Image (cartoon, helix red, strand yellow):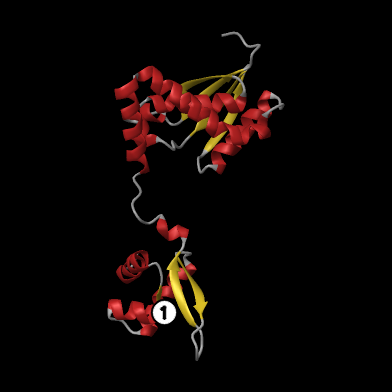
Amino acid sequence: MQSTRREIIRHLQRLGEATVRELGQLLGLTSTGIRQHLTVLERDGLVTAREERGRVGRPTLVYSLTLKAEELFPKLYDELALYLLQEVTATQGKESLHRLLKGVAIRVARPYLERVNGKPLEQRVEETVRIIEEQGGLAACHREGDFYYIDEFTCPFSRVARREPAVCAFHVEVIRLLTGADTRLTQSLLRGQKACTYRIRPSFSPS
């Protein structure tokens, strides 16, 4: 991003909101120059403007950041998640960690269960793929003999999973709950394979 626009975003983050005049004073630029940068930032969905009416004259535009702009600033979600998992392991043991993650898997899957409950397995597998993609992932499914397979080509927890493999078991449990069938992880991105592949076995299939 162009440096002046980055500085505008940083000032708006500090101030909450500001006018063209205020931003010009902070950056030492003309109002025309500031407006040009704000036009680009508005186009990109990073800032928004509202009118503020004074006692006299035309209303003044006051600018603030959008939620999209908030994502430009560092977020330590992965580090926090890892520290929490490590703390549970250190204070309560691995067994407690697995129980905790199983409970979290139930919470993650619960909002989607109405979409899959009561459907044939093939439809549940297809719906699970759609859910993964709605969450920003990239996935596909296919059938080989009696087994269904989901290939997930992106890992939403890769940074945490590299340090705490129990996260992989958590995601397998989410897939199991959504498909309603026995689920096994047969390939893993963390092992250098092309996808995390989940083998889903119908109840009538031999082991």
Quarter that holds the C terminus: top right
Q: Is residue 205 above or below residue 12?
A: above
Rendered residue at 37%/84% (across/down):
31
Q: Quadrant of residue 94?
A: top left
Horizontal and vertical percent position of residue 146: 63, 16
Quarter that holds the N terminus: bottom left
Horizontal and vertical percent position of residue 178: 60, 28
Q: Quadrant of residue 99?
A: top left
**Is the residue marked by circle 1 packed among few (<14), some (14-19), or many (20+) residues within 10 Å?**
some
**How many numbered marks have been drawn onto this rendered protein structure?**
1
Horizontal and vertical percent position of residue 165: 37, 25
- Look at the image and tell me whether residue 47 can be seen: yes
Q: Residue furthest bottom?
A: 57
55 left or right, relative to 77:
right
Q: Quadrant of residue 20?
A: bottom left
User: What is the secondary structure assignment of the residue under circle 1?
Assistant: helix
127 left or right, relative to 89:
right
- Look at the image and tell me whether residue 187 can be seen: no
Rendered residue at 62%/22% (across/down):
180
Horizontal and vertical percent position of residue 45: 48, 64
User: Label 1 belongs to which residue?
Assistant: 35
Nearest to the observer: residue 77 or residue 87:
87
Q: Amino acid at mark 1?
A: Arg
